[in-house]
Amino acid sequence: MSDFDLQIYAVLANIPSGKVVTYGDVAKMAGYPRHARHVGKLLGNLPTDSALPWYRVINAKGTISLTGDKLVRQREKLRDEGVGVSEGGVVSLRRFRWNGEPDG
């Protein structure tokens, strides 16, 4: 496993319940600014049963990038944590975005 992978996983593991971050946020917090697409690719390759909270990562527009059943799965996981998500997968970044601080 690469250092990049380990750093991304470490950031993911620390995203608090009820918060979201963007792919770019994860990349920046991991020390790899401008690597949002790489983060997306890595998350796309996570095993289906991964314990990492992959579903707390959305795009910079504040929407879920996935479609179909995957969008529904991510939306429901976020809603279970109290994150407001529209039927189309839109989340208020202003309200639910995590800034990387331990207290949320």
Image: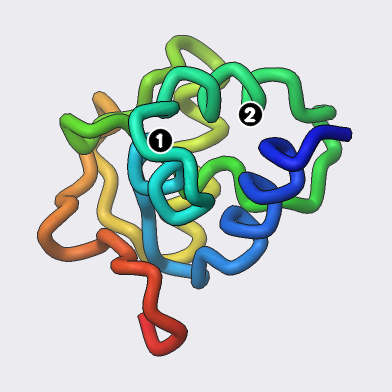
Question: Which of the 4 image quadrants contains residue 1?
Answer: top right
Task: Report the front residue among 63 and 81.
Answer: 63
- Callout 2, which amino acid? Leu
Q: Is residue 22 above or below residue 100?
A: above
Q: Secondary structure at mark 2?
A: helix
Rendered-image quadrant of the C terminus: bottom left
Would residue 103 appear left or right of 2 to someone viewing this image? Answer: left
Locate residue 47, reporting x and y percent.
83, 28
On the image, numbered disc 2 is attached to which residue? 43
3D distance between C-alphas at marks 2 and 1: 9 Å
- Callout 1, which amino acid? Tyr
The crowd level at tag 2 (other Cα within 10 Å; few <14, some 14-19, many 20+) is: many
Q: Are marks 2 and 1 in contact (CB under 8 Å)?
A: yes
Sequence-wise, the earlier of marks 2 and 1 is 1
On the image, numbered disc 1 is attached to which residue? 23
The crowd level at tag 1 (other Cα within 10 Å; few <14, some 14-19, many 20+) is: many
Q: Who's the residue at 62% across and 45% down the image?
A: 8
